[in-house]
Amino acid sequence: MKSKDIQDIVLSKYLNGDTPTKFFRDLNGGVGLATIKRWCQMIRQYGSIELSSPPGRPRIARTSENIRKVNNRCRRKRRVSARKLSMELDISERSVRRILKNDLGLRRYKKIVEPALSDDQKIKRKQFANWVRTNFRKEETLKILFSDEKLFGIDGIYNSQNERVWAVDRADADKRGGIKEKRKFPQKVMVWLGVCSKGITPLVIFDEGTVNHACYIEKVLPVALKYGSKVFGNDWIFQQDGAKPHQHYLTQQWCLNNFPSFIDKDRWPPNSPDLNPLDYSIWDELANAISWNKVKLKTTLIQQLKSSINKVRESVVFESCASWTNRLYRVYQNNGNYLR
């Protein structure tokens, strides 16, 4: 069926004295010349374009009733499958997808996995954001040394949404690298890293995997102290999350006795990886710098981690730390909810 807008344009041009051939050129062939001439004849006879019935085959599947049914099901259910809707309405899956996309203007979105925050945790996150904004100037927050641990596996990183292979069929896709092999029990390495506006600390690797408070105090805290004192002198703040080795009273006592200042276990909000630059920026930067095709064993993974730490861009490090206060403001404005 011809668009009502196009009909209005033809009517306007006819009233201005333009010829059908000029209509056809101005519309870039959007409407056939024969159709334009027929419309001009209608205008001469009736003063308007009157179509007794829409041209083309009438809709069978994408009727107003089916559109209403699809819309109602989408509103009632959180998860809607085009295949199941097709079976329920007894129309083709292709028609269902057209209804969803063209008639209802809907798009598909993947579910996002994020930590489940309790009301108490949201309150603590909001209180922490307010505490920082009230007690620290922007330049003081740039003297915070953030820290975190992470497990890296020899299978590497994999994003099912972004890693696509273009091929003529499934067999061709498999030949072009369309299969991601995953070990049942892959070897993993636990690492620690510190990051601040001045750069990143040396990487601490835990060969044995697990970390208790004694190991943390012996291997990690001296590295953090040495680096923080080197880049900031005697005026800086150490940050760590609420992991058990961090909360241990001996760890807290060591921090109190050695660091110029630190965020203690009762201050940092629980379940808040979105507030640590390592979690929301640096770990991904490091993972993307690793040549995963060279990682075959735990030893090669350790080698790649050590060499790739120098590939982390300084601009990313600075921007992730400089934007920290903006994230805190968003947390406060968002009533403590998780930031995506």
Image (cartoon, grey):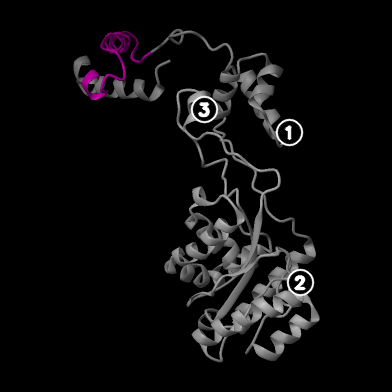
Image side of residue 331 versus residue 315, left or right: right
Quadrant assignment, res 181: top right
Q: How many marks?
A: 3
Mark sitting earlier along the chain (1/3): 1
How far across and how far down the image is residue 100, in percent? 58, 28
Mark whose residue sits in front, 2 or 3 = 2
Left or right? Give the position of 97 relative to 22. Answer: right
Q: Which of marks 2 and 3 is nearer the N terminus?
A: 3
**The C terminus - image quarter:** bottom right
Q: Is residue 128 magenta?
A: no
Q: What stretch is highlighted in magenta?
A: 24-49
Residue type at mark 3?
Asn
Q: Which amino acid does label 2 sit on?
A: Asn
Q: Where is residue 96 in the image (x, y as percent from the top left)?
A: 60, 22
| On-image quarter of the N terminus | top left
Q: Which of 337 and 167 is in front in this view?
A: 167
Is 103 situated above or below 108? above
Could you say whether the residue bearing mark 2 is in a helix, strand or loop? loop
Whether residue 333 is visible, yes or no, is no
Which residue bears the numbered disc 1? 76
Residue 28 is one of the magenta-drawn residues: yes
Q: How far apart are marks 2 and 3 (CA)?
A: 56 Å
Q: Quadrant of residue 60?
A: top right
Tell me the residue that label 3 is attached to.
Answer: 102
Residue under the image location 66 percent in, 59 percent down: 338
Provide the residue designation for mark 2. Answer: 212
